[in-house]
């Protein structure tokens, strides 16, 4: 019995060393690139509402908060997104007759670092740089838009 336990301990020790060696052989930047997007993408999957009151004057960075996180002050229009897994989403449409509603769109994370977000709707693509993403805040820097919306 003691011999079996010793053998199993030796095998586990050898296996754990091998696993650590193969992980250590991968550069730290690559390990981070594989670890971060999954966490970021999971935080993205919710209903975000733009919180213009938190934005810095003169900065193009847009601040979004989860819809249920607070009571937002009255506003004629607040941009909002609902991001879902698999690349589907909805965006709040600014209707000329003030009958605002959600319309379907698609989203994707692009670039090697997973920090560029593209939202495609109505033949247009809007690109953002993700400045910050957690379960509590989404900060986006608009990059460029292509097409017509």
Image (tube, rainbow, N blue to C red):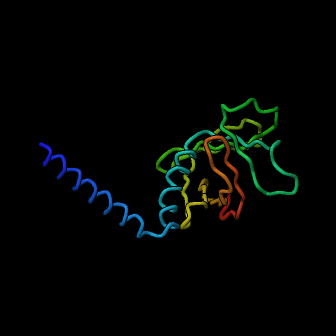
Q: Residue furthest front?
A: 2
Front residue of 62 and 82? 62
Residue at image point 60% right, 58% down = 118
Q: Residue furthest right?
A: 57
In the figure, 46 relative to 140: above or below? above
Query: Horizontal and vertical percent for residue 40?
Result: 56, 51
Front residue of 92 and 55? 55
Q: Is residue 132 left or right of residue 114?
A: right
In the figure, 127 relative to 5: above or below? below
Query: Horizontal and vertical percent for residue 66?
Result: 65, 38
In the figure, 19 relative to 95: above or below? below
Query: Horizontal and vertical percent for residue 24?
Result: 42, 66
Q: Is residue 96 left or right of residue 2?
A: right
Residue at image point 71% right, 38% down = 100
Residue 147 in which image quadrant: bottom right
Residue 108 in which image quadrant: bottom right
Residue 25 in which image quadrant: bottom left
In the figure, 107 relative to 53: above or below? below
């Amino acid at each position: 019995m003691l011999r079996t336990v010793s053998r199993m301990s030796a095998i586990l020790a050898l296996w754990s060393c091998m696993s650590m060696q193969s992980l250590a052989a991968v550069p730290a930047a690559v390990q981070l690139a594989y670890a971060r997007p999954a966490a970021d993408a999971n935080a993205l999957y919710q209903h975000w509402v733009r919180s213009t009151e938190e934005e810095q004057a003169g900065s193009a960075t847009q601040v979004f908060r989860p819809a249920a996180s607070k009571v937002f002050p009255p506003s004629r229009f607040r941009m909002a997104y609902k991001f879902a897994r698999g690349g589907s989403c909805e965006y709040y449409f600014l209707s000329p007759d003030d009958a605002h509603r959600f319309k379907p769109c698609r989203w994707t994370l692009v670039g090697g670092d997973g920090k560029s977000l593209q939202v495609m709707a109505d033949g247009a693509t809007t690109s953002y740089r993700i400045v910050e993403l957690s379960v509590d805040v989404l900060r986006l820097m608009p990059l460029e838009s292509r097409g017509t919306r």
